[in-house]
Image (cartoon, grey):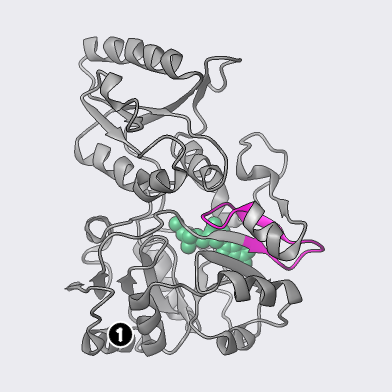
Amino acid sequence: MDTKIIRMDEENIDMQTVKMAGNIIKSGGLVAFPTETVYGLGGDALNSSSSKKIYAAKGRPSDNPLIIHIVEMSALSQIVRKIPKAAYQLAEKYWPGPLTMIFEKADCVPLETTGGLNTVAVRMPSNQIAREFIREAGGYVAAPSANRSGRPSPTVAKYVIEDLFGRIDMIIDGGQADIGLESTIIDLTGTSPMILRPGYITEEMLRQVIGDVEADQTIMDDHAAQAPKAPGMKYKHYAPKGNLIIVEGEGRQVSTYINEKLSAFHKEGKRTGVIATDETAAGYLADSVKSAGEQGREEQTAKCLFRILREFDDEGIEIIYAEGFKQKGVGQAVMNRLLKAAGHQVVRLSGENSSM
Ligand code: AMP
Ligand code: MG
């Protein structure tokens, strides 16, 4: 398939091209587009054959439901059975933005889009290119992240092209994604609201609006007894090609431990990488040391984490050590993604070692 690649600036949107992209969706095709979280792979959410094409292009298991992207509150009432009060309150505060809510689905939403579930995930993005595109596409765009299944989500178009060129009709390159991690997912269909995936909108921010919220036990704990409530969270995710290990402990202790390991791997002829911070990067002896931003600025880490994982792949890095990040604020989402990328391999220097 011939894939058109179009470069566009959020401040200077070419409506002619956006209309063309919208028409591709209306006629059952697929377009990758920028959002404030990560790039999305869009298809017509109300057309079952479009959803099937999304799963095929990504190589995604078909029981892993898609998120429907809308731009108007009036669209929400068309695709869900009822809108709970909490949804209005959350939408008022955080839409458009990086929050996905789960509702009971209306009949017009095909089961192909929801991975066979009777519930549906909905988000209203804030990126202006995304908004114009969704409008031109008819108002209901199903869009998972625009990567091949299992790979880190793309935060720049280069990695969408790498994964999906030749498999979809168009890629809109809108530059670097602002946030860099996928949306927070909150389920509003149970007795109390439950976070299924952490993101930029934190538990605390949700609580400020709707009071008590629960968090799915499986978010940070690999050994939780039950399966994750968001089907997608059970799959291997975000993994770089190299073996990634997280090291937690006090500053000096962490760098000393990692450097010892690195020197052993060097002797074996392995190419090594480290995910560090601005403050610690200079202290590592790896082939490739990347800073994930300033210490304590977890939103900087969120923005660059997936790009760093992809860059290690580009550089043929085989062994990657990452410093652990604080789980406050968006740091919880950062560690959720990093733990998944590492297959939960964590060394805890001050306490017991886990999974090593
Ligand atoms: P992605 O589109 O790659 O960000 O993945 C979407 C995430 O939303 C996956 O983890 C899905 O399992 C989750 N999700 C989508 N729809 C639902 C739903 N109806 N119920 C629970 N989780 C959902
Ligand atoms: Mg994804």
Does 275 sit left or right of 141 as displayed? left
Residue 162 seen in render: yes
Looking at the rendering, the stretch of residues picked out in magenta corresponds to 186-203
Ligand 1, seen in the image, is in the quarter at bottom right
How many numbered circles does the render carry?
Answer: 1
- The kind of residue tagged 1 is Ile
Regarding mark 1 in the picture, which secondary structure is present there? helix
Where is residue 298? Give x, y as percent: 46, 43
Q: In this view, does 90 lie above or below 153?
A: below
Where is residue 3? Give x, y as percent: 20, 72
Does 353 sit left or right of 264 as displayed? right
Residue of label 1: 24
Does 122 sit left or right of 133 as displayed? right
Residue drawn at the location 40% of the way across and 69% of the way down = 54
Which is nearer the eye, 13 or 233? 13
Where is residue 229? Give x, y as percent: 66, 54
Residue 63 seen in render: no
Q: Quadrant of the N terminus?
A: bottom left
Which is nearer the eye, 97 or 306? 97
Q: Does the magenta stretch include residue 197?
A: yes
